[in-house]
């Protein structure tokens, strides 16, 4: 599953990285959400690939995002 974060509209609420900490993390420079290096696509902090074992966690994080900035594509 491809995951994309619209970081510009992130409100740093912490819900994604608290819900799915292996996949999402807080960027130390701007405090916005980013994808952990393990799952990034081409090193891009806002794009990644969720393996099957992370899909449910990532979907939960996307659902809980109050500003709905996490996009999922199969």
Image (tube, rainbow, N blue to C red):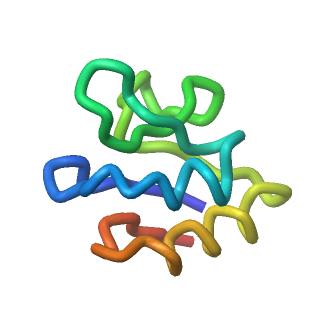
Q: In the image, what residue occupies the spot 60% across and 61% down?
A: 1
Side of 3 relative to 7 (left or right): right
Q: In this figure, what is the number of numbered marks?
A: 0
Where does the image place residue 27, in percent across and percent down from the top left?
A: 38, 28
Identify which residue, 73 or 25, lies in the foreground: 25
Instruction: Determine whether 46 is above or below 20 in the image.
Output: above
Residue 10: image x %, image y %?
25, 55
Residue sitting at the far bottom: 63
Q: Is residue 30 left or right of residue 74?
A: left
Is 2 situated above or below 35? Answer: below
In which image quadrant can residue 44 be found? top left
Find the residue positioned furthest to the left. 8
- Residue 55 x %, y %: 72, 64
Locate residue 9, reporting x and y percent. 17, 58
Q: Is residue 71 left or right of residue 59?
A: left
State the quadrant of the C terminus. Answer: bottom right
Q: Residue at x 33, y 50 (%)?
A: 12
Task: Establish if 64 lies above or below 37.
Answer: below
In the image as oriented, which residue stretches furthest toward the right? 53
**Residue at 67%, 44% in the rendered image:** 21
The image quadrant that residue 57 belongs to is bottom right
Residue at 41% x, 38% y is 34
């Amino acid at each position: 599953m491809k995951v994309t974060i619209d970081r510009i509209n992130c409100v740093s609420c912490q819900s994604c990285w608290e819900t799915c900490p292996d996949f999402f993390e807080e960027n130390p420079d701007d405090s916005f959400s980013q994808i952990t290096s393990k799952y990034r696509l081409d090193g891009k902090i806002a794009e990644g690939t969720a393996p099957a074992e992370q899909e449910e966690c990532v979907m939960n994080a996307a659902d809980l995002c109050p500003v709905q900035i996490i996009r999922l594509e199969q």
